[in-house]
Image (cartoon, grey):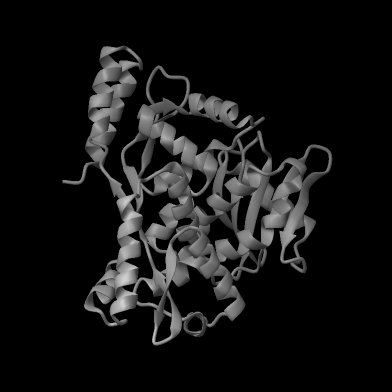
């Protein structure tokens, strides 16, 4: 279990300055925070944005640096026997959130939530990790642009993001790294272009689907004829009018990315439960489960069924996250070549990247 998290800013006059920490009683010295910054600055000689793991005396540290433009790092302090590298993806995600809220120190009220989220990151399922990656508004917009354009220089992406979100600076590395590590895009240097290029190699489909196990239980009539019929009618009505939308994708990623809500969702995928039974199975307070169920109900994920006079929570819709090979991009590349929209050398590299990522 990590000991805590710190946020440090570089000041040209004062040096490394501790801006925030969680928990409040966490102890860290000026010498330790300076050594972490120095390790980032010396890593490749240009203090590039990115992750590193290191030992600072007795401290075991996983840290993410935002680069010269931002000049902040976020570090997770670990027990001596913990493996720092397993927190890399989660730390990139947390750092991205913090770097986007540096103005007026808006990130500080999120520190406890971010730390708790980070400590659970290594145990997340693949669908949770993908949801976490795409739950960031900047990263989701970046990914949507990649599905439209297919390829882009990083300098163009940075300019586009700054303009779209009216940002003074953007830490592109922390936004791109999870997309790369999850196999959605790849980065290459292309001769003759001013910066590194990003290429889309996998797309993602996120949508609601029926809760198969729960539908089967209703079809078997084990809840009684009335409760089973009412549930099936409600599910049919929902999917009869259902269409995937950006707002719904945002709701789905929000549910899957929240570990506490996801724990409830996993149980509801297998059976219906009363609030009390959910609290008992998850060893949580009834008030916490009630709050989570209300959240799921507000987003139309659950409904209530009455079985033997007792109200149970039933999953009305489940969610599915699927990655797939973007065949449509081959035609898009041909169009971009014929219309001379992008440099031929870039388009050739994109075709090679798609070929290399194709699952035979």
Q: Residue 280, position in %: x, y?
A: 50, 85
Above/below status of 127 relative to 49? below
- Viewer-proximal residue among 347 and 188: 347
- Viewer-proximal residue among 333 and 343: 333
Above/below status of 170 relative to 111? above
Q: Residue 178, position in %: x, y?
A: 45, 47
Mark count: 0
Q: Residue at x 35, y 77 (%)?
A: 271
Please tell me in which quadrant of the rendered image residue 184 appears: top left
Q: Residue 1, position in %: x, y?
A: 58, 72
Q: Relative to residue 120, is residue 27 drawn left or right?
A: right
Let me know if residue 341 appears in the view: yes
Q: Residue at x 44, y 49 (%)?
A: 248
Q: Relative to residue 112, is residue 161 drawn left or right?
A: left
Please tell me in which quadrant of the rendered image residue 210 appears: bottom left
Above/below status of 60 relative to 20? below
Give the farthest residue toward the front.
226
Q: Residue at x 77, y 69 (%)?
A: 25
Let me know if residue 320 appears in the view: no
Please tell me in which quadrant of the rendered image residue 288 appears: bottom right
Q: Relative to residue 261, is residue 167 drawn left or right?
A: right
- Viewer-proximal residue among 36 and 184: 184
Q: Residue 120, position in %: x, y?
A: 52, 66
Give the farthest residue toward the bottom.
308
Give the farthest residue toward the left.
360
Q: Residue at x 28, y 74 (%)?
A: 218
- Viewer-proximal residue among 245 and 13: 245
């Amino acid at each position: 279990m990590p000991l805590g998290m710190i946020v440090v800013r570089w000041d040209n006059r004062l040096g490394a300055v501790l801006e925030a920490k969680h928990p409040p009683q966490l102890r860290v010295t000026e010498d330790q925070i300076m050594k972490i910054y120095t390790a980032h600055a010396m890593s490749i000689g240009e203090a590039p944005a990115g992750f590193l793991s290191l030992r600072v005396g007795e401290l075991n540290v996983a840290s993410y640096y935002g680069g010269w433009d931002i000049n902040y790092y976020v570090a997770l302090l670990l027990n001596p026997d913990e493996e720092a590298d397993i927190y890399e993806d989660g730390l990139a995600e947390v750092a991205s959130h913090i770097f986007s809220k540096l103005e007026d120190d808006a990130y500080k009220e999120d520190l406890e939530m971010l730390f708790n989220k980070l400590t659970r990151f290594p145990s997340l399922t693949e669908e949770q990790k993908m949801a976490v990656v795409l739950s960031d508004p900047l990263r989701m917009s970046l990914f949507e642009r990649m599905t439209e354009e297919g390829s882009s220089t990083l300098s163009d992406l940075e300019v586009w993001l700054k303009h779209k979100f009216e940002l003074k600076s953007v830490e592109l590395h922390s936004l791109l790294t999870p997309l790369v590590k999850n196999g959605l895009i790849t980065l290459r240097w292309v001769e003759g272009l001013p910066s590194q290029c990003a290429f889309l190699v996998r797309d993602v489909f996120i949508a609601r689907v029926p809760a198969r196990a729960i539908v089967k239980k209703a079809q078997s009539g084990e809840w009684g004829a009335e409760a089973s019929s009412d549930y099936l009618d409600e599910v049919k009505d929902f999917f009869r009018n259902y269409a995937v939308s950006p707002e719904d994708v945002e709701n789905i990623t929000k549910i899957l990315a929240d570990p506490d809500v996801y724990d409830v969702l996993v149980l509801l995928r297998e059976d219906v439960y009363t609030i009390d039974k959910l609290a008992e199975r998850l060893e949580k307070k009834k008030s916490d489960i009630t709050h989570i169920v209300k959240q799921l109900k507000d987003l139309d994920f659950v409904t209530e069924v009455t079985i033997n006079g007792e109200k149970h929570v039933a999953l009305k819709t489940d969610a599915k996250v699927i990655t797939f090979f973007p065949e449509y991009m081959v035609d898009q590349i041909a169009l971009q070549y014929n219309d001379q929209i992008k440099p031929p050398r870039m388009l050739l590299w994109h075709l090679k990247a798609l070929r290399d990522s194709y699952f035979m």
